[in-house]
Image (cartoon, helix red, strand yellow):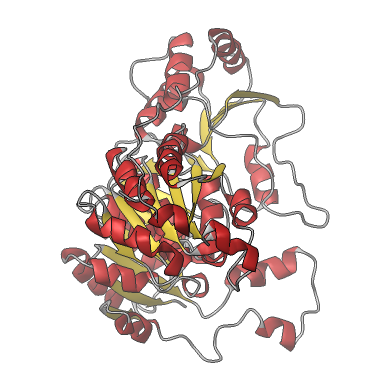
Amino acid sequence: MNGAEALIQTLSECGVEVCFANPGTSEMQLVAAIGQQEGMRAILALFEGVVTGAADGYGRMTDKPAATLLHLGPGLANGLANLHNAKRARTPLINIVGDHAVDHLKYNAPLTSDVVGVATPMSNWVRTSTSPSDLSVAGAEAVAVSQTYPGQIATVIAPGDHAWTDGAEVSGRRETPDVPQVKDSEITEAAAVMSKLGQAALFLGSRALREDALFHAGRIAAATGARIICESLPARLQRGVGRVPVERLPYFGEMAVEHLASFQQIVFVGSEPPVSFFAYPDKPGWLSPEGAELVELADAYTDAEDTLRRLADALSAPESPANVQQAATHSFEDGKLTTESAGIITALLLPENAIVSDEACTSGGPFYKYMASAAKHDWLTLTGGAIGQGLPLAAGAAVACPDRKVIALQADGSGMYTNQALWTMARENLDVVTIIMKNNSYAILNIELGRVGVTNAGEKALSLLDLTNPTLDWVSLSEGMGVPATRAETAPQFYDALAAALANTGPHLIEAVLT
């Protein structure tokens, strides 16, 4: 058994069932080993950003790691933006990155690079194998690291000669660290703060936004009158009818400051106090109100559900939340398609237990608003702000949950970063309905231009934010990669297109031309 075979079998026996890959010459022994491993599914993507983004979507939905297979430092570098998002989402994920054979590094061949240096900023843990036998050991360690609560990025660097040399053995499973829990004294202190006069808030992030944790947050709200707020960009928010609703903190800093201004006490579970996404002239960076009592009860690496349950019990909260989301329906106007009508229609048609990958950017507000009162669903967002996540994330979620419909809400500009994900959706027959928000602009940057104080942008500057020369044809792009596509310019057309796409399985794209 060579090192590659020992590594892949170790990963499989440790529960890794999927490998998203874009390999090269240095990974051919690993490719062959995956081919021999019946317990591991191999999924090709045509760009490394799709590989890493899909592994992120898979990990968010399963709470266990997929593997990626990447080609040396440059291949890893192509996937770093979505590894940044995955790290911010605290997703369990294992990167397997090939490198030159140890004795070949001295020649400084064209693809030689500092792979550790490339990997480190977007990984929680990086390890280069030291021998063929050590390669499987590194793999077993990576699995345990990746599943450290709530999830981490582990990167294993595999020199080519370690992969092809015989004499290696499978390594056994390593123990995953216990999930940290808050102290009883900290629960008591937080309960005392929540019981004070004045408006209180529970501010939630990470695993605190799962249904069971939100149930206990709802109990706390019932006992104290506290409002429940979550971070602007949650990794996975479970919402819809019958679940405890959450107020999502506005993205723009001054709006967030206004949203939080009335609170005298804020208790944080699964999140740190929020800050503005960027610095702006004469705008706040720190968003919590001055004078408010802030209690960081449990960070993202502490058991969120346990924390909220114990806090609810310490407050003698009722056994059930007082406020759960009720169903509501809204009517839409015929005529040209708008974000408002598109959001209402999507909420009306949303299947039970759907998964939504949201990279709609400036077009997403109405979708989020109206789908709150739709069927139960999971909402995945652009956690790290590195655009190009939405389509790969949807693909990975579909691999993770083949029995659930996935809807990708995708802005047209950021969709071009990783449109190769459509090809993978077609190749794997993934049940993803992609809705392209077609406004022919980097609309968020047009907004940001004014927010940073630019008042005299000329034609040349504005041309850098415009997508009309030439105008993108998403129907042709999609069909060219094997995904059937439809264009909708009116609300009735969009309703019919979405209803038809949801009624079938497999990938479909709707180009929603917005006015």
Q: Position of residue 36 (x, y in %)?
A: 23, 56
How many marks on residues?
0
219 is higher (above) or lower (below) than 169: above
Q: Position of residue 143 (x, y in %)?
A: 41, 39
Report the residue at 49% width, 44% height from top: 154
424 is higher (above) or lower (below) than 381: below
Residue 240 visible in the snapshot: no
492 vs 9, nearest the viewer: 9
Report the residue at 46% width, 57% height from top: 161
157 is higher (above) or lower (below) than 170: below
Q: In screen coordinates, is 442 left or right of 15?
A: right
142 vs 479, nearest the viewer: 142
Q: Position of residue 324 (x, y in %)?
A: 35, 33
Q: Residue furthest left?
A: 504
370 vs 416, nearest the viewer: 416
Q: Position of residue 511 (x, y in %)?
A: 37, 77
282 vs 262, nearest the viewer: 282
Task: Give the quarter of the image for residue 393.
Answer: bottom left
Q: In screen coordinates, is 288 left or right of 324?
A: right
Q: In screen coordinates, is 352 left or right of 316?
A: left
232 is higher (above) or lower (below) than 48: above
Task: Give the quarter of the image for residue 460.
Answer: bottom right
Q: Residue furthest bottom?
A: 470
Residue 449 visible in the snapshot: yes
Report the residue at 80% width, 74% height from top: 455
